Image (tube, rainbow, N blue to C red):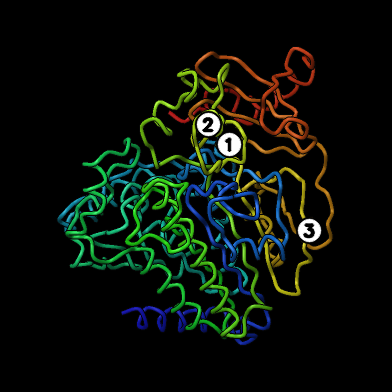
């Protein structure tokens, strides 16, 4: 079935973009975007991880262009919507987040009814306002997305085609994607039944429950859990690369790794660690598997002779998350393990050393996923092209929604509508700085925040209805609120942030 789909795509693209296809991959660089799930920057050994290594990711950091101040969303759904549209997630007129879990069912016969409902309530960009894959389509590329798919919590097959994907394979529901043993996956317009997987919850288990004997036993009960989705995704990725080695392609490898915890085997590197508990070894193995898969993709590029002609981008959707809870080690509600004080992320902020997070996935910054503190929105972002980009570190404030205009600039595709994002191509190729007044906006459960390239960050904290001001160039850990010292800067940023939220600061709250 896969080859039939691919051959059909090849035929259509040959007819519609013959000139572009005839140039082959050597005429236009391929782009592979590796999009990790909840990958805190501090989980990479290149950024200080001490309990395991990530050699393949580190190699891209040390040989590519990396960004020290890159921000995603505070949660997956919003971050992915921003990536695909080029708009920040305080602008709620550009997409609608659908309820998750609607495909979590035994019978797949009525899935089309759920899709009809979602399609009828979705927001589509106007025809001349391009989604990310449509930018590549304009340039004559084959487009594919494999793994965690779509825009928002739940997507439909119709939406995937509307957004410009020629081929897609994986989950269309972010709730199901938290289980690694799905009973079915979507491949273009068909549903692939995985008969050896029988768990309706996809083996999702206890995502944010404290580890105990019952949870451990259920997680390692492999009944009905035979086919591991990350294995399928890396396999489909290699198939796609081989099939289109002679044509320009854009591929998003949107892996569910490394969270939540669900792994068929402990990685040998951490198996005998005396510092890690069992569930911490499992989580470390998830990060190790992600790194191994990056190595597999890079090895395949070299085998196919495509490494010099492929731009590889690595990013995460949001900041670090904790899914390896243990009593008296790190537990919910998150609290200071020495004093017992619960973190409120305002007067008492979450920090790894106080909370007991041995991995320090947020690199010592405050907060986690769902927060507008740096630890919740700060992401790794790396661009690599062998002999095509010089190794450097960029200190500009950038965002996941900059990817679309960057790719348009890279491909020479003119955008007819103004996006919230800006092109990073001058920074990537010439080391040019973005303007000092460039800013990034992000929403969260705690409220919206705005980060300016000169280092100022204004954060709105919903529970107390207050604003906080930080200079993240000097204080990336956000320990010192300086709003009383710089009232004029705070007032200017309040106006700008409210404007970005459509005139209502509440629009920047994820309810």
* Alpha carbon separation for disc pair 2 and 1: 8 Å
| Residue 392, label in figure | 3
Quick one: SS at disc 1? helix
What residue is disc 2 on? 371
| Residue 375, label in figure | 1
Q: Nearer the viewer, mark 2 or mark 1?
A: 1
- Occupied quadrant, residue 491: top right
Which of 490/409 is in front?
Answer: 490
Residue 238, placed above or below residue 318: below
For label 2, count other residues whose C-alpha is less than 10 Å away and answer few (under 14), some (14-19) or many (20+).
many
Q: Is residue 366 left or right of residue 148?
A: right
Q: Residue at x 49, y 22 (%)?
A: 338
Residue 241 shows in this picture: yes
Q: Is residue 101 left or right of residue 74?
A: left
Coordinates of residue 57 in the picture (x, y in percent): 60, 62
Q: Is residue 158 left or right of residue 391?
A: left
Contact, CB < 8 Å: mark 2 with mark 1? yes
Quick one: SS at disc 2? loop
Coordinates of residue 378 in the picture (x, y in percent): 61, 41
């Amino acid at each position: 079935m896969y080859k039939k789909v691919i051959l059909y795509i090849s035929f259509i693209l040959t007819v519609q973009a013959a000139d572009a296809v005839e140039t082959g991959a050597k005429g236009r660089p391929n782009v592979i975007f590796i999009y990790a799930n909840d990958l805190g920057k501090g989980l990479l050994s290149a950024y200080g991880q001490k309990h395991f290594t990530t050699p393949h990711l580190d190699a891209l950091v040390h040989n590519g262009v990396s960004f020290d101040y890159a921000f995603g969303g505070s949660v997956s759904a919003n971050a992915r919507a921003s990536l695909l549209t080029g708009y920040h997630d305080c602008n709620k007129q550009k997409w609608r987040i659908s309820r998750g879990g609607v495909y979590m069912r035994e019978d797949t016969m009525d899935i089309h009814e759920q899709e009809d409902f979602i399609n009828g309530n979705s927001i589509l960009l106007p025809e001349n306002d391009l989604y990310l894959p449509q930018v590549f389509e304009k340039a004559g590329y084959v487009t594919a997305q494999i793994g965690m798919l779509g825009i928002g919590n739940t997507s439909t097959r119709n939406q995937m085609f509307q957004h410009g994907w020629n081929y897609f394979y994986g989950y269309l529901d972010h709730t199901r994607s938290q289980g690694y043993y799905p009973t079915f996956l979507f491949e273009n317009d068909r549903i692939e039944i995985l008969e050896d997987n029988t768990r309706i919850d996809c083996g999702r288990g206890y995502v944010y429950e404290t580890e105990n004997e019952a949870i451990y036993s259920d997680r390692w009960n492999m009944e009905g859990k035979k086919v591991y989705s990350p294995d399928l995704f890396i396999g489909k990725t290699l198939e796609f690369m081989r099939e289109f080695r002679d044509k320009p392609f854009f591929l998003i490898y949107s892996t569910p790794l490394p969270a939540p915890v669900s792994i068929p085997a402990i990685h040998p590197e951490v198996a005998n660690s005396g510092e890690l508990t069992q569930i911490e070894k499992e989580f470390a193995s998830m990060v190790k598997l992600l790194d191994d898969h990056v190595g597999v993709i890079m090895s395949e590029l070299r085998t196919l002779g495509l490494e010099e002609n492929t731009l590889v981008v690595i990013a995460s959707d949001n900041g670090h998350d904790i899914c390896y809870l243990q009593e008296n080690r790190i537990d919910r509600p998150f609290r200071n393990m020495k004093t017992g004080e619960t973190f409120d992320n305002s007067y008492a902020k979450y920090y790894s050393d106080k909370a007991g997070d041995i991995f320090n996935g947020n690199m010592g910054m405050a907060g986690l996923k769902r927060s507008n503190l740096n630890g919740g929105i700060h992401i790794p972002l790396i661009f690599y092209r062998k002999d095509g980009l010089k190794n450097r570190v960029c200190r500009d404030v950038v965002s996941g929604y900059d990817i679309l205009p960057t790719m348009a600039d890279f491909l020479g595709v003119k955008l007819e509508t103004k996006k919230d994002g800006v092109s990073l191509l001058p920074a990537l190729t010439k080391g040019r700085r973005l303007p000092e007044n460039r800013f990034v906006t992000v929403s969260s459960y705690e409220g919206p925040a705005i980060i300016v390239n000169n280092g100022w960050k204004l954060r709105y904290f919903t529970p107390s209805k207050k604003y906080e001001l930080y200079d993240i160039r000097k204080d990336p850990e956000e320990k010192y609120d300086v709003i009383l010292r710089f009232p004029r800067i705070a007032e200017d940023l309040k106006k700008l942030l409210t404007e970005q939220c459509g005139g209502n600061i509440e629009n920047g709250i994820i309810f």
